[in-house]
Amino acid sequence: MFAHLLKRLSFALGLLLIFPIVFVYLAWSDPHAEHWQHLLDTNLGLYFSNTLVLVLGVGLGTMLLGVSCAWCMVHSHCYARRWLQIGLLLPLAMPAYIIAYTYTGILDPAQANPIAHWIGQIGDIRSLFGAILMLSLVLFPYVYILTYNAFRQHACTYTETSQSLGLSSWQYMLKIALPLSRPAIFAGVALAMMEALADYGTVAYFGVSTLTTGIFRIWFGMGEASFASQLASILATIVLLVLLLEQFQRRKLQYYQNKQSQKAPSFQVSRVQKTIVTFYLWCVVALGFLIPTIQLVTWASTFVSQTDWTEYGILLWQTLCLGFVAGAVIVTIALLFAYSERFYPRSVFRYLSQFTALGYAIPGVVIAVGVMTPLGWLDIQINELWYGWYNEYLGLIFSGTIFALVLAYCVRFMNIAKQNIGNALLATTPSYDDAVMVLGRSRWALFLKVHLPILRPALLSAFVLVFVDVLKELPATLILRPFNFNTFAVKAFEYASDERLTAAALPAVSIVFAGLIPLYFILKNIYSEDS
Amino acid sequence: MLAVDNVEVILGQNKIVHSSTFALSPGELGCLLGPSGCGKTTLLRALAGFCEIASGNIIINNQTVSSVEQHTPVQNRNIGYVMQDFALFPHLTVAQNIAFGLHRHDPNASDLRVNEMLELVQLTDFRDVYPNALSGGQQQRVAIARALAPAPSLLLLDEPFSALDPALRESLVNEIKAILKASKVTSLMVTHDQGEAFAFADKVAVMNQGTIEQWDGAFALYHCPSTRFVADFIGEGCFIEGTDLGSHIETELGKFAKQKKTTIESNSDSLGVELLLRPDDLVYAKNGAFGGIIQSKKFRGSHIMYELVLEQSGQQLLCLTPSHNDFAIGSIFCFDVDIAHTVYFPS
């Protein structure tokens, strides 16, 4: 009885979560031929070519950075290994739009800075190439993490056999390590590419026209919501194609698991080489995290006297509230989904649930379009009905409130929570359930006394990951936030867009430091076998 | 105490257990033995109440708990169940695990019972230890203590030794048997290992394809198997061709008198039978009546198992003999035949 209710509820919520994605595609019911003709004559080519160059560039950039760092960490000696292990993950805490405006400030030619002047000679950071660089610097850890694990999982006997056959470390990398790690590398690159496709903040700040900025411009500049949806659906399709490719590659990953993993770096290197490797790795960490963070902290500290602390307090409160509400809602729904899948492994709900997992790949802009349009329509209908009965307007119930925002976050971040909780629930084998029943306890006791304590760490890590992602999320928040409601991300972006870089520093630095929290969980997972 | 009467279990479209009947008296240790996929675990789960039965009755402690019309929920059957993987809750200490089923007791009584159980399984020092810090054998004793704590009228054990190191198993089986005998609980274990079954149980049900082929003590299963499957499955041996001559069986190794109780009567019109020869039925004799060529030998410490071939017929035989009777492969091995129980099946 209770289980049936659970299943129905999960089913309804699952439908609600895939609705925004489906709705984006439904916009094609009105083809907008004349708009397309106009766009084709003007910007469409630019949108596509820029998006394509951006995505491929970020793919290449993250691959070079990620693979080289992973190789150095697994197979080469370097100084301060422990610190580098942490350091190479730090860029994950740095949203791309924040690093983008920080470097813009650092390299401002107006500053009497010789390095800035010298780099200014090479080219402007506010360009397509600059955007690729910025995104690569913060997204390469995806490739690094997966490749690092792949390299480590290659049996040390592979390395030893290669050495006994007279292969140099360079030959070993080209002939053994890279071919074996290809699925892992591609998985990381695909993740980075999806993030690049979803990016709005960086490209908007640098004035590069891509599909995301195009959707913004058409929706808010031209006021064409359903046309924007059509463009969004194209963007979503590209992302799903990348995802499909990645899934296809990922299936091969399982063949490359090996118990006997690498222990210590196995190739002997000279002291000079060791120094060069260490220098290279610290350069990557410095560019991706240390330099921008130090700059942000400096700006924030010079701006302390001018900071409006009541405003900051309200901002902090609103950001935390939003993070907590979204985190709690998403974790609860993910738990509900996990149980429905456990109780009804053969039901249609499984497919629905897997479909909702796609949301994490869908750019925030697209989800915002998919959430806003139907909810706006619903609000208008409700208000008309209400006006008919009571002769007054209710106001916006769904579209202009935190409801729309939380719904969008649910669509985008449900997968993170579901994966965490689903994996943990797998650890509670059915024999636990049987054991509890035999000992004469109820299902409720099973949940409270056995499952919940076992799930607690997973629930916590799911909550923290979602919480921080909500803090960092920009485009969906920008579009869907209620009037007068701001988060750190929105405020940092607004100040930066107004060229008030020092004012943007405090909210930006707040996001970066919050982003460091989930690194703890990620660190524990990645390096668990090292200790 | 436990009576299983013509029980059938159907899962999905498949009949997993065919009309099975057996009974255990109070304090007796029983065992369901059979190859994997024979339905033994399903039958055990039906006794526990995890699945419903399609026909027949299950009676525990003079109360019908399962029949076609009635299905007492697991919680109300007053049984203990030891899972194959023990299912110890990882976030609870040994004492908390054991106390888990004692929720109806008041805290003091529960505490007393936990101590009693810890003493029974000799884990008093491990009260506040978490399961992951215990060895496999200790975890198993905790699982048994947890199952016994609410004083069940019947304890069910699902392959309780399969998760453990083979080297440990033998001593553990004896230990667990002693614990169960001391607590006087009626128990039923499922296993595919006949060594475990014989060491543990007073009575064993040999199951094959959902049917109980024989319900008997270990001695009877080995020496007087009632079906061809049981004869094959239990112990080692081979069959030789023979002819049923009414009062005795004639084979190339001589005539053997039939005993009344050994097997079912064969069809009167088919005179051909297969006679079971256990390796210990062949006795080494320097001037034995028969001789076979040694094909292979396995050294087992105190004994050697020879695989022989009779020269005329090519019939294969097994012979277990003390290991000082050591001969090379290819040489002739002389033996006499000494059969205490004539076991034969129509061929």
Image (cartoon, coloured by chain):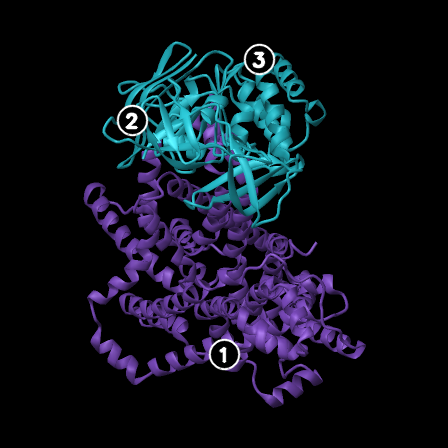
Chain colours: A purple, B cyan
Mark 2 chain: B
Query: Seen in the image, is A154 located left or right of residue A462?
Result: right
Q: Residue A64 appears at what percent x and percent y?
A: 58, 76
Three-letter amino acid code of the residue under disc 3: Asp
Mark 2 packing: few (<14 Cα in 10 Å), some, or many (20+)? some
Q: Is residue A398 visible?
A: no
Mark 3 chain: B
Query: Are marks 3 and 2 in one subunit?
Result: yes
Cβ–Cβ under 8 Å for marks 3 and 2: no
Q: Which residue is mark 2?
A: B266
Q: Which residue is mark 3?
A: B106
Residue at horizontal 47%, vertical 70%? A193
Q: Is residue B128 above or below residue A94?
A: above
At numbered mark 1, what does the secondary structure look like: helix, strand or loop?
helix
Query: Seen in the image, is B226 located left or right of residue A319?
Result: left
If the image is split into quadrants, where does the N terminus of chain B sit?
top left
Which is in the foreground here, disc 2 or disc 1? 2
Q: Which residue is mark 1?
A: A57
